[in-house]
Image: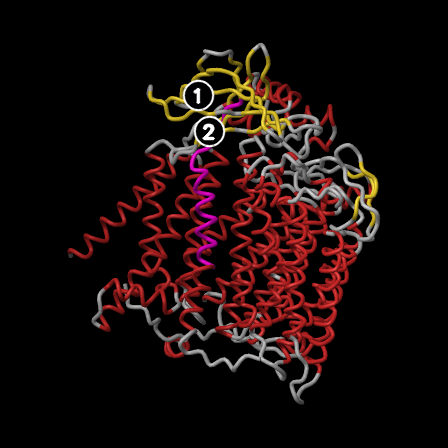
């Protein structure tokens, strides 16, 4: 039953996507004429059918319907509720279903801004969304079919399946359960959907860019209409990446949060491009420059999301994120090639129509700062891309193994990151067109001193790591510039209009929500930069063997090993050690690092236990537990919470701009009546 | 006079803070532990997936790390320790490959990216060079609306 309903909803969605592509294209191709072409209908059908496919999958998972191959191989009767729900995107086929739902939602959002022919730009964008949706639903209907029927059952898995929904189903008595790593932390339910909202949201600016190119319609309209989607997508991507780091930190037991793993890099690449685009879009809006470059950025951001999808789902990289199957790999690679050649070909053919008039008067200007920002972000992305793909390509062509790891990325990206911080401090207070040195200096002089003071305090209190001191000074400078700018502008406004300071400040912020939302994001990035520098340079590590009753001293803490414990949970067996953490003879925490064993999956999953505090984290990992006692790995990471906080603050800047702009637009809305 | 004094004091305070930071960082001690950690983070753990021996909980990584610590204590230089590992395992043991024919592109592509980006930014500049004339300058760039600070 689920197989039939699921397959039908996928096919209906596929049909709607194809119809949307054709109808959208027809509506975009005609410059006038009566508006007889309806686009809302296929969009609604697409949305409903996509949501239905996810609901059918969830229902099958919740109802333990092991006659579906997907459920039999990625779910077990004993899987807890949260991980059962999350299993819908925990494996390859299901992840494409979630992708399809988000894409249908994005398409629906675009269609809300579409107001009948002759809105050719909107119609063209909907056609492109339809085309991308066609691809993903075609995947679900063919190589990544989540609704295959199990026709040969093993004891706890499905051995063979048929794509035909009416095939005679054989249900195994129980399923294999999710990948152990994916049922080990509740963030599994949040991190992937956040990332997908980000990835898929980047389809919208791409769709508008392709439409504008195909129609030869330059100008800011395509930017304006994709701006909300881009900002929302960027915010979700920021949250997704941050939560991914948090998840890695709490699950992967090596005390880190970012390993320059190819798949992590694949999520960072579109983020970098989208960040560059958000900045250069401002230049196009304000000064009419950089349009061609913006097309390049949007194409790059979208292509990189497809590249990331390919890397995770083709099995070319070995990583915790990789799905194991590979039949879908060549198809995704083919799609990437098509996207790249079609979009770049279109861009080359139409570049002369959309090239903006050169208007840069001086590099010493806000425009120049934006150019520098774009250069740094693009080179950053290039380094990450080359470092990620190079070992794969060398190995594919010559068989040689080239190790490209964290030291390579750190060596090249850390200087770029410091450059970005500096630009982030100076750029937002640099005048447009032509900035005279004295003007800029007056605006950054005091913040520079504040940054220097922060550095001096840090050195005097004993932190003498150059990277940390540098990051703290630059980040303090960035924040001080923003605070000073708000202070000065609101003071001027209060004096001019005779209103209170507080009201003036609120008016200033609400009056330019794009700018101030951006500054909020900058504060988040500055916070994260301090956390990253501290975690990378000030962490300490030690290893100790303990028997019950032993106490170890570590980084100012006393750790006492009380007792081992064994828990039999429905879906796993937990072996762990209870450890009391004391500081200055006061108990601050009781930690239980553990090894979780899931039946039938081989080695146990080493799960760390973390005591978090503002001062720093105590991070304990069990590497051995037997009759002779335990081996305990101890890590402290100072200020790691700043990374999570910074990521969330950065994302909230994007949300702030979006929400305030919406609210400000509402009363003065002149949008035509909707169809 | 008081304005001059104020500036003078501000400059002195700034210079003192800068000196504190500079001296504090230059004289910062580098411990053997942090040296071993730095070397260990450049060497790949042979039995892991792209992890450094400094980070990996694997047994082999632990014993390789112990070797690094021993060599550091014996007074070997960073390069000598790295070279010894390359001699016994091969180039692939390094997580940051040195500049060599097989890895040249890895370092050259980002460098080329920087060069192209800079050239493109510079080329844009030729379009309307700013006039070095006070009056035209003022007309072109009106005073910012922000109040003077």
Main SS of residues in magenta: helix
| Furthest residue toward left | B1
Colour style of the rendered protein structure: secondary structure
Image quadrant assignment for residue A273: bottom right
Q: Is residue A351 left or right of residue B18?
A: right
Please say if A412 is above or below A306: above
Image quadrant assignment for residue A534: top left
- Kindly identify which residue carries mark 2: A636
The residue tagged with tag 1: helix, strand or loop?
strand
Alpha carbon separation for disc pair 1 and 2: 9 Å
Residue drawn 46% across the image and 56% down it = A423
Please say if A215 is above or below A380: below
Q: Is residue A151 left or right of residue A586?
A: right
The residue tagged with tag 2: helix, strand or loop?
strand
Q: Is residue A170 left or right of residue A385?
A: right
Numbered tag placed on residue A554 in the rendering: 1
Magenta span contains residue A652: yes
Of mark 1 and mark 2, the one earlier in the sequence is 1
Q: Are marks 1 and 2 in contact (CB under 8 Å)?
A: yes
Magenta span contains residue A575: no
Residue drawn 54% across the image and 57% down it = A234
């Amino acid at each position: 039953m689920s197989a039939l309903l699921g397959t039908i909803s996928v096919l209906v969605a596929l049909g709607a996507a194809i119809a949307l592509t054709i109808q959208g294209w027809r509506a975009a191709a005609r410059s006038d004429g009566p508006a007889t072409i309806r686009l809302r209908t296929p969009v609604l059908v697409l949305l409903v059918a996509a949501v239905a496919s996810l609901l059918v999958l969830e229902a099958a998972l919740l109802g333990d319907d092991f006659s579906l191959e997907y459920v039999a191989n990625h779910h077990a009767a004993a899987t807890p509720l949260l991980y059962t729900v999350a299993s819908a995107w925990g494996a390859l086929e299901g992840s494409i279903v979630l992708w399809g739902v988000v894409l249908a939602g994005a398409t629906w959002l675009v269609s809300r801004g579409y107001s009948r022919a002759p809105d050719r730009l909107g119609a063209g964008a909907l056609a492109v969304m339809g085309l991308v949706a066609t691809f993903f639903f075609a995947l679900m209907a063919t190589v990544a079919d989540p609704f295959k029927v199990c026709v040969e059952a093993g004891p706890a898995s499905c051995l063979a399946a048929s794509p035909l929904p009416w095939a005679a189903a054989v249900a195994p008595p129980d399923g294999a359960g999710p990948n152990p790593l994916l049922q080990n932390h509740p963030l599994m339910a949040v991190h992937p959907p956040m990332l997908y909202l980000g990835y898929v949201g980047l389809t919208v600016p791409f769709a508008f860019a392709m439409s504008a190119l195909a129609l030869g319609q330059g100008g800011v309209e395509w930017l304006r209409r994709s701006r909300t989607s881009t900002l929302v997508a960027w915010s979700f991507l920021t949250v997704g990446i941050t939560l991914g780091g948090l998840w890695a930190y709490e699950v992967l037991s090596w005390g880190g949060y970012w390993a320059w793993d190819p798949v992590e890099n694949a999520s960072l690449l579109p983020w970098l491009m989208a960040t560059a685009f958000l900045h250069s879009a401002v230049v196009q809006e304000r000064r009419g420059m950089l349009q061609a470059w913006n097309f390049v950025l949007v194409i790059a951001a979208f292509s990189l999301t497809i590249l990331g999808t390919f890397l995770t789902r083709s099995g070319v990289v070995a990583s915790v994120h990789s799905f194991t199957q590979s039949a879908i790999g060549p198809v995704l690679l083919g799609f990437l090639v098509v996207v790249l050649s079609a979009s770049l070909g279109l861009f080359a053919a139409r570049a002369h129509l959309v090239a903006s008039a050169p208007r840069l008067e001086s590099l010493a200007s806000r425009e120049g700062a934006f150019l520098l920002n774009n250069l740094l972000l693009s080179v950053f992305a290039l380094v990450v891309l080359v470092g990620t793909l190079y070992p794969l390509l060398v190995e594919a062509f010559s068989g040689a193994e080239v190790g490209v790891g964290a030291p390579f990325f750190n060596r090249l990206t850390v200087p770029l990151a410091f450059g970005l911080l500096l630009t982030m401090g100076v750029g937002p207070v640099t005048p447009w067109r032509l900035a005279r040195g004295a003007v800029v200096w007056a605006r950054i002089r005091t913040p520079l001193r504040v940054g220097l003071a922060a550095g001096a305090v840090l050195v005097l209190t004993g932190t003498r790591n150059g990277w940390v001191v540098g990051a703290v000074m630059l980040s303090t400078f960035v924040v001080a510039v923003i605070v000073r700018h708000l202070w000065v502008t609101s003071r001027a406004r209060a004096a001019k209009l005779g209103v209170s300071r507080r009201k003036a400040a609120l008016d200033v912020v609400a009056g330019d929500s794009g700018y101030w939302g951006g500054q909020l994001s900058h504060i988040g990035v500055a916070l994260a930069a301090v956390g990253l520098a501290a975690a990378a340079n000030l962490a300490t590590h030690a290893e100790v063997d303990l028997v019950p009753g032993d106490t170890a001293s570590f980084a100012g803490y006393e750790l006492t090993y009380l007792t081992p414990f064994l828990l039999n949970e429905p879906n796993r067996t937990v072996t762990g050690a209870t450890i009391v953490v004391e500081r200055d003879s006061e108990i601050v925490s009781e930690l239980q690092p553990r090894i979780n064993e899931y039946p039938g999956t081989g080695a146990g999953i080493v799960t760390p236990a973390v005591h978090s505090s503002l001062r720093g984290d105590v991070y304990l990992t069990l590497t051995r537990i037997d009759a002779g006692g335990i081996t305990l790995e101890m890590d402290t990471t100072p200020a790691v919470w700043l990374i999570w906080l910074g990521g969330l603050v950065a994302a909230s800047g994007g949300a702030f701009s979006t929400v305030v702009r919406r609210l400000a637009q509402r009363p003065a809305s002149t949008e035509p009546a909707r169809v | 006079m008081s304005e001059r004094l104020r500036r003078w004091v501000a400059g002195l305070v700034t210079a003192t803070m800068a000196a504190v930071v500079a001296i504090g960082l230059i004289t910062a001690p580098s411990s053997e532990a942090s040296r071993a950690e730095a070397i260990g983070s450049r060497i790949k753990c042979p039995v892991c997936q792209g992890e450094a021996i400094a980070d990996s909980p694997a047994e082999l990584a632990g014993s390789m790390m112990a070797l690094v610590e021993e060599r550091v204590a014996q007074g070997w230089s960073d390069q000598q320790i790295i070279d010894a590992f390359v001699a016994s395992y091969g180039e692939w043991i390094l997580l940051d490959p040195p500049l060599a024919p097989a890895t040249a592109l890895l370092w050259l592509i980002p460098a080329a990216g920087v060069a192209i980006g800079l050239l493109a930014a510079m080329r844009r500049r030729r379009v309307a060079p700013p006039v070095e004339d006070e009056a035209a300058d003022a007309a072109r760039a009106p005073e910012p609306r922000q109040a003077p600070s």
